[in-house]
Image (spheres, rainbow, N blue to C red):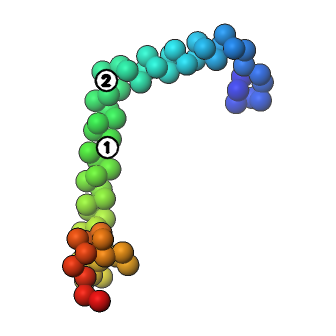
Amino acid sequence: KLMDGLLVTQQEEAHLDILEQQVSNHPDIQVLLAAQEKLENLMQAVYFAINQAVTGSCSSDCDSCGGSCPM
């Protein structure tokens, strides 16, 4: 309904909220979210390593590499 621009009743909205909470609290979803976060962290490290290899320096914000960039 919502995607078609139709109004959702309070009862339907409450039911959707309960379903969303149940899905969010499901152990398999928790495992998936933790794995997704680990993958995102890994990809950031990969992008950082590629950037270092290509440019030979850190990004414009020296905080990204520990603040040891030459001025």
Q: Give the residue type at disc 2.
A: Asp
Residue 68 percent location from the top left of the image: 21, 79
Q: Which residue is mark 2?
A: 28
Q: Is residue 4 above or below residue 48?
A: above
**Callout count:** 2
In the picture, measured across the screen, residue 14 lies left or right of residue 32, that is right
Residue 10 percent location from the top left of the image: 69, 14
Crowding near pointer 1: few (<14 within 10 Å), some, many (20+)?
A: few
Tell me the SS state at disc 2: helix
Residue 39 percent location from the top left of the image: 29, 47
Q: Which part of the image, by quadrant, shows the N terminus?
A: top right
Q: Is residue 50 visible?
A: no
Q: Which residue is mark 1?
A: 37
Residue beneath the point at 65% across and 13% down: 12
Q: Give the residue type at disc 1.
A: Glu
**Of the numbered discs in the image, which one, if any, rests on residue 16?**
none
Looking at the rendering, which quadrant does residue 15 occupy? top right
Which of label 2 and label 1 is nearer to you?
Answer: 1
Q: Nearer the viewer, residue 47 or 71?
A: 71
Residue beneath the point at 41% across and 24% down: 24
Cβ atoms under marks 2 and 1 closer than 8 Å:
no
Residue beneath the point at 31% across and 43% down: 37
Work out how far the residue at label 2 is from the one at label 1, CA to CA, in angstroms: 14 Å
Question: Could you tell which of marks 2 and 1 lies nearer the N-terminus?
Answer: 2
Q: Is residue 5 above or below residue 61?
A: above
Q: In the displayed orientation, state which residue is furthest to the bottom.
A: 71
Residue 42 percent location from the top left of the image: 25, 53
Tell me the SS state at disc 1: helix
Residue beneath the point at 32% across and 41% down: 36
Q: Is residue 8 visible?
A: yes
